[in-house]
């Protein structure tokens, strides 16, 4: 009987040689091994991570390179034998064992494209329950769970669904926003590559809830592996009768399409994304009306993030209260945080809201990889605020982080050490906005250019006090008058950098860096 060996086909694992490791294990193990392609567990510093199924559970080895395979066989790793790359049972590795895995419960565990494996591990349970419920009851369940959008805005999902459900249009749509463009974020990609059926299941449930029979997954073109896996997963669901007409013998009909973006960061904004799906240039639309009333092709449309939709099956299967019991205040449930930058143990950490920055960066992340002191962390992507070690006791929740001058965004946390120039980081925020602006509104299109120019003047020591006043005025204008969060949030990293490190904004860049 062959031994099951689990090796990720996640992009992160493939980038460091997972495919070659799998080929070498198969070459040396022959018929004694069965290679199962999974997603990544999220311990990215251990990739490629190889797990061997034993009577005691899965034993983890990593990071494994092709040249390590012979010594693994010599050490008896097919029986969980000891080796310098062994980490013992995967489930008890502290980084993994401390997490609250709800949305990512199956990622790294199941054969990502096996519908049978998905069902064995609780998949389709939420959908089967939803198919027996009236649509308004599904909406109420999501509303009671406290689930909020995981894409950044944090808008209550149940309210959005209730609005769309109330519309009388015969044609409605539901769209998954997988245009994950924030620096240091990769949770959407990991979910699609490791547990694609959960996203599809969530979209079918959402379709039944609001009365939509058509859905779209909008994936950024930079995710070729996710695109390929999602297309195969859609085909598997169609073949099994979980997509199409009369799903599960019910009166629910739902078709799902994959759409690929063209590299525009702004298409992460929902109205720009809808314009792109329609074949138009990705530009922000003026609101109102909101998409839930008039969205794709001017029909009621729900736009949710991948993580939001993939969490819905858990809520339906386990109940709204079970999910709401996690978290704090109005931040209910869990958030998959993504830890990157100068950090020893980067990866994905799914925890209930309320965990502190210190726990994420120092306990899970193990501090900096370089050994240098942490200077700041940026939370919420390239437009998120900078927080210093003095603020690391701040709990990670929508409200608590806002009080500290930041935002949770998509849950990305990037660590910077003490060699980082915060003046350069502030300038980068303005330059990023300049490059990625859709160009529709003047505060964003022109304000970002003027902001970059003003920061260059400050860095050169040119009339510093007056230019700091100009910069503040520009930030006010961008925050208050931009059409969307692209321009509206760009001042956040600029202002938090200036507030935390004022000495770096007082003269020539060389002087400020000393």
Image: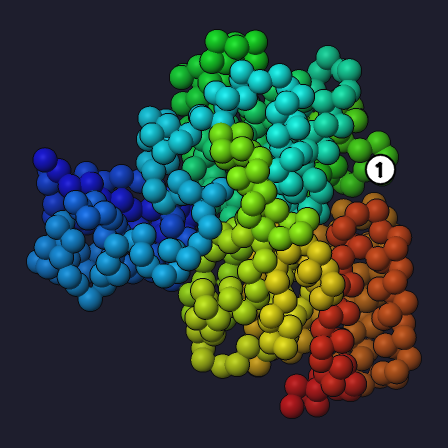
Q: Looking at the rendering, in which quadrant would you find the N terminus? A: top left
Left or right: 371, with 93 as reference point:
right
**Left or right: residue 248 compared with residue 208:** left
Residue sitting at 64 percent across and 41 percent down?
146
Q: Is residue 422 above or below residue 38?
A: below
Quadrant of the image for the C terminus? bottom right
Where's residue 418, x and y in %?
57, 81
Q: Is residue 305 visible?
A: no
Which residue appears at 53% of the width and 39% of the height? 322
Task: Report x, y in % for residue 408.
Answer: 65, 56
Task: Depth check: give the residue in front, 319 or 211.
Answer: 319
Measured from the top left, where is residue 167 in percent x and y? 77, 20
Residue at (13% x, 38% y) in the render: 2
For label 1, the crowd category at 10 Å Cα-Cα, with few meaning under 14, some 14 to 19 and many 20 or more, is: few
The structure's colour scheme is rainbow
Q: Position of residue 231 (x, y in %)?
A: 46, 29
Q: Tell me the element at label 1.
A: loop
Q: Please identify the quarter of the rendering in which residue 464 is found.
A: bottom right
Label 1 belongs to which residue?
Answer: 287
Query: Is residue 454 in sight in this rendering?
Result: yes
């Amino acid at each position: 009987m062959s031994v099951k060996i689990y090796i990720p086909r996640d992009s992160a694992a493939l980038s460091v040689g997972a495919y070659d490791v799998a080929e070498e294990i198969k070459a040396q193990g022959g018929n004694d091994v069965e290679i199962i392609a999974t997603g990544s567990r999220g311990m990215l510093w251990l990739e490629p991570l190889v797990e061997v199924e034993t009577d005691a559970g899965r034993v983890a080895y990593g990071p494994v390179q092709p040249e390590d395979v012979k010594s693994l066989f010599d050490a008896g790793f097919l029986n969980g034998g000891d080796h310098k790359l062994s980490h013992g049972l995967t489930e008890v590795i502290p980084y993994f064992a401390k997490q609250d895995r709800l949305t990512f419960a199956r990622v790294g565990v199941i054969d990502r494209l096996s519908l049978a494996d998905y069902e064995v591990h609780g998949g389709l349970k939420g959908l089967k329950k939803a198919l027996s419920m009236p649509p308004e009851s599904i909406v109420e369940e999501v509303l009671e769970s406290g689930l909020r959008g995981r894409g950044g805005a944090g808008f209550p999902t149940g309210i959005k669904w209730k609005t769309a459900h109330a519309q009388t249009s015969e044609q409605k749509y539901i769209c998954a926003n997988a245009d994950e463009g924030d620096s240091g974020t990769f949770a959407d990609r990991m979910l699609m590559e490791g547990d694609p059926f959960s996203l599809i299941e969530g979209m079918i449930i959402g379709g039944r809830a609001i009365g939509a029979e058509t859905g779209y997954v909008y994936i950024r073109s930079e995710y070729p592996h996710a695109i390929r896996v999602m297309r195969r997963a859609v085909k598997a669901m169609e073949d099994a009768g979980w997509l199409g007409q009369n799903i599960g013998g019910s009166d629910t009909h739902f078709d799902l399409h994959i759409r690929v973006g063209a590299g525009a960061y702004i298409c992460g904004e929902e109205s720009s994304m809808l314009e792109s799906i329609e074949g138009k240039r990705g530009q922000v639309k003026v609101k109102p009306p909101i998409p839930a009333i008039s969205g794709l092709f001017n029909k009621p449309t729900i736009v949710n993030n991948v993580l939001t939709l993939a969490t819905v099956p858990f809520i339906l299967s386990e109940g709204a209260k079970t999910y709401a019991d996690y978290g704090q205040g109005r931040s209910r449930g869990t958030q998959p945080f993504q830890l990157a930058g100068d950090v020893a143990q980067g990866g994905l950490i799914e925890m209930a809201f309320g965990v502190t920055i210190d726990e994420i960066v120092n306990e899970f992340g193990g501090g900096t990889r370089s050994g240098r002191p942490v200077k700041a962390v940026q939370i919420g992507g390239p437009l998120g605020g900078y927080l210093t070690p003095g603020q690391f006791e701040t709990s990670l929740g929508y409200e608590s982080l806002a009080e500290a001058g930041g935002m949770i965004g998509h849950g990305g946390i990037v660590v910077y050490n003490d060699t980082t120039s915060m003046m350069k980081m502030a300038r980068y925020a303005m330059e990023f906005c300049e490059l990625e602006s859709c160009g529709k509104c003047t505060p964003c299109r022109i304000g970002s250019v003027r902001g970059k120019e003003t920061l260059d003047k400050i860095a050169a020591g040119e009339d510093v006090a007056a230019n700091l006043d100009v910069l503040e005025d520009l930030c006010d204008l961008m925050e208050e008058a931009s059409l969307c969060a692209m321009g509206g949030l760009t001042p956040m990293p600029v202002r938090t950098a200036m507030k935390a490190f004022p000495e770096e904004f007082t003269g020539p860049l060389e002087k400020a860096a000393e």
